Image: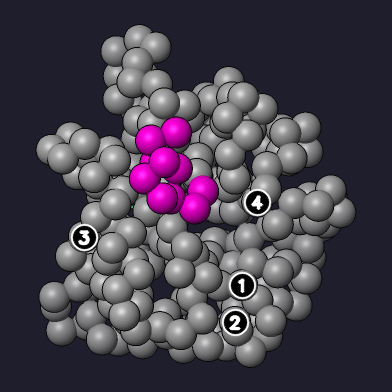
Amino acid sequence: MLLGVNIDHVATLRNARGENYPSVIEAAKICLAAGANGITAHLREDRRHILDEDIYALKFDLKCRLNMEMAATDEMQKIALKILPDSCCIVPEKRKEITTEGGLDVASNPEHYAEFVKPLIDAGINVSLFIDPSKKQISAASDIGVKYVELHTGAYARAFGNKTEQKEFDAIKQATALGHLLDLNVNAGHGLNYDNVHRMNEIDNLHELNIGHSIISRALFVGLDNAVKEMLELVNKN
Ligand code: PXP
């Protein structure tokens, strides 16, 4: 299983003081040197953490394997077509949310999403849709022609250690199996941390995990290099 490190919260810390440190690019370099398979960054409409110049620097200066998270807006589509990241993960975005709260409802709006992703796919970007682990959403994503989905693991993460953990885990496992059957590359992420991530190893055919907040938080105590290495060990433990 691959690990993409989401570095949004390095930018959160930087922006909190309006300084130019900590450097998002330096953080990305450390993550990659520690063994991360790629860097994920979410360019939000309100630019609360990652800024346009960060995305440009990740792509054109660092030239890393970049997964750009973005809302399905004309503005973001234009930026993605200019930058051509390796992959784009389309996420729902609400201004007031603290973090991405749920998956896209592709099943209710297939034409809208099909039209939105087409120019991105035509430009050679691996487009992924961030969806809840439901069969309905997996099938809808497959029908509109994307080759990647990312399953929202937030419900599992919140349920971890509680009596609904198994139900939420099973939903991810079944959605992954269906995605694999439909020839989709299935990624997962959101809320995964050093306690709950190990169960992702029980799921066959998960392609990549995107993890941010827990790694950047752990880095405060053990350093970013160690935080990434510790997570990699858990992600690849079978
Ligand atoms: N995947 C997606 C699509 C996300 O929106 C986020 C949060 O930005 C993550 C993964 C990472 O979530 P976390 O920061 O909780 O690890």
C-alpha gap between disc 2 and disc 1: 7 Å
Q: Nearer the viewer, residue 29 or 119?
A: 29
Question: Mark 3 or mark 2, which is nearer to you?
Answer: 3
Q: Which residues are magenta?
A: 29-38
Q: Which residue is mark 3?
A: 194
Q: Mark 1 and mark 4: span between their CA atoms?
A: 12 Å
Label 3 with label 2: CB-CB less than 8 Å: no
Q: Earlier in the sequence, mark 2 or mark 4?
A: 4
Write the residue at 27% across / 38% down: 224
* Ligand 1 closer than 8 Å to label 1 CB: no
Q: Is residue 178 above or below residue 127?
A: below
- The residue carrying pointer 3 sits among few (fewer than 14), some (14 to 19) or many (20 or more) residues within 10 Å by Cα, namely some
Residue 174 in the image: state x and y as whole percent.
Answer: 46, 88
Q: CA separation, marks 2 and 4?
A: 18 Å
Q: What amino acid is at disc 1?
A: Asn
Residue 21 drawn above or below residue 1? above
Task: Inspect the image, locate mark 3, and give the three-letter code of the amino acid beneath it.
Answer: Tyr
Q: Are marks 2 and 1 in contact (CB under 8 Å)?
A: yes
Which badge, 2 or 1, is on the more N-terminal residue? Answer: 2
Sequence-wise, the earlier of marks 3 and 2 is 2
- Name the element at disc 1: strand
Q: Amino acid at mark 4?
A: Ser
Reading the image, the residue beneath label 4 is 87
Cα gap from disc 3 to disc 4, whole angstroms: 25 Å
What secondary structure is found at the residue carrying circle 3?
loop
Is residue 77 rendered to the left or right of residue 20? right
Residue at label 2? 179
For label 2, the SS is helix
Q: Earlier in the sequence, mark 3 or mark 4?
A: 4
| 36 displayed left or right of 230 | right
Q: At label 2, which amino acid type do we have?
A: Gly
The mark found on residue 185 in the picture is 1
